[in-house]
Amino acid sequence: MKLAGKKALITGGNSGIGLATARLFISEGAEVAITGRDQQTLNEAVAELGSKAHGYRADVTVVEDRKKLFADLAKDFGKLDIVFANAGITGRTPTGTTDEAVFEKVVHTNLNGAFFTVNSAAPLMNDNGSIIFNGSVHNYLGQPGVAAYAATKGGLVSMARSIAADLAPRKIRVNVVAPGATQTPIWKRGPRASATAEESAKLSDFFSSTVPLGRWGEPEDLAKAVLFLASDDSSYINAVELMVDGGLTGAPLRGLHSSRLTVENSYKGQTACLLGKACVFTLRRNLKSVARECQIMKSEWQIWQTQSWLICYPKCE
Ligand code: NDP
């Protein structure tokens, strides 16, 4: 067992990557504290994980919640060996039309929330511990409409290096795991909640086609990488960002027609998400206009249209 006797905190441990990591940590001998905002999924997760799991309802953006969480952890756990600062949200923040409150919510959750989790956890941690932040491929992709999200995920990487320096005297390692598109409930939250099963399945197939390994990430793929960073298997790995994206950033598929994308990635307020070699529009209005624009290029572009998305991608040569 790789984590026998270890005590771990996982924020956002009631869903997706956090929950998969809690399962794996427990199977490797750890006792795990999981947090989340949603009491129901928290209860369900604890019921599934068993007696080695403890649930704490805490919003990472709320100071009082964090104070109570760490007071409870000091009482229930005494010390911590591992912190996985995983809780995070997405959010559309297109340049020119974004409300400050939306931008701030993403930053407050993903960056402030992660920092202050670790800030409060540090005094409770044993020497030789491990801290892992959950980053994202968006640190590198340069996709439109996600400035706040991308900034938070890039910010985590630089923040992790500084924190690694702060905690080096105590031999606490600090690293970032950076997932590519991973099948978790995050893809069903917000505007995506209204997608039909067929749309989601088609989008899933499409995303898979953009990844060199030909599939989405599963939460378990990420959990294994987090276990590696949490355990002694990575004993000399410190202040790094570990990409877990099937090669999306390291070996991107060719054919991203960047000159075309300047025309197509924005149409009357629509923003498109560039994935691998394709251009994905999340449609709210102007469906016909965007479709017409893509049609103009149909000799070079294939078009696939659903109720919620229009995807234009270059025909394979
Ligand atoms: P999920 O939506 O399944 O999980 C997100 C978790 O974060 C939930 O447990 C949620 O708890 C928690 N959370 C969100 N906001 C808060 C908050 N303010 N306070 C406390 N907990 C909060 O998504 P994932 O598992 O996919 O996401 C986990 C991390 O992975 C995120 O940081 C995300 O950015 C990152 N990531 C995910 C990718 C993907 O494709 N899935 C790709 C790249 C990065 P609750 O439900 O109770 O609110």
Image: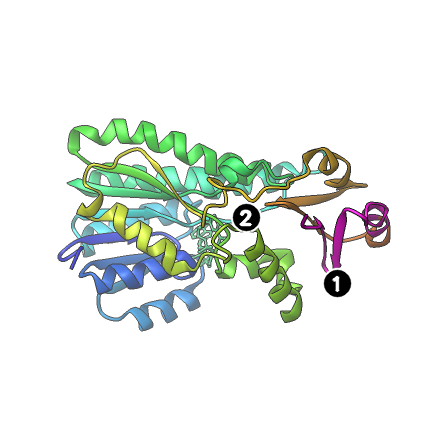
Front residue (pair 292, 267):
292
Q: Is residue 141 magenta?
A: no
As drawn, 184 above or below 130 = below
Residue 111 location (% of width, % of height): 44, 38
Front residue (pair 21, 127):
21
Residue 129 location (% of width, % of height): 19, 42
Q: Amino acid at mark 2?
A: Thr
Front residue (pair 142, 5):
142
Q: Residue at x 42, y 42 (%)?
A: 113
- Is there CB contact under 8 Å for labels 1 and 2? no
- Residue 122: numbered disc: none
The quarter of the image holding the N terminus is bottom left
Q: Amino acid at mark 1?
A: Gln
Lower sequence index among marks 1 and 2? 2
Real-space Cα separation, disc 1 to disc 2, in angstroms: 22 Å
The residue labelled by disc 2 is 90
Residue 214 location (% of width, % of height): 51, 56
Q: Is mark 2 within 8 Å of ligand 1?
A: yes
Q: Residue at x 60, y 66 (%)?
A: 201
Front residue (pair 185, 107):
185
At label 1, counting other C-alpha atoms closer than 10 Å, the crowd grade (few under 14, some 14-19, many 20 or more) is few
At label 2, counting other C-alpha atoms closer than 10 Å, the crowd grade (few under 14, some 14-19, many 20 or more) is some
Q: Which residues are magenta?
A: 290-317
- Residue 307: numbered disc: 1
Please tell me in which quadrant of the rendered image residue 308 appears: bottom right
Please tell me in which quadrant of the rendered image residue 236 appears: top left
Query: In screen coordinates, is 131 left or right of 291?
Result: left
Q: Is residue 158 visible?
A: yes
Q: Residue furthest front?
A: 317
Question: In the structure shown, which secondary structural element does the residue marked by tag 2 occupy?
Answer: loop
Q: Is residue 13 visible?
A: no
Residue 34 location (% of width, % of height): 32, 58
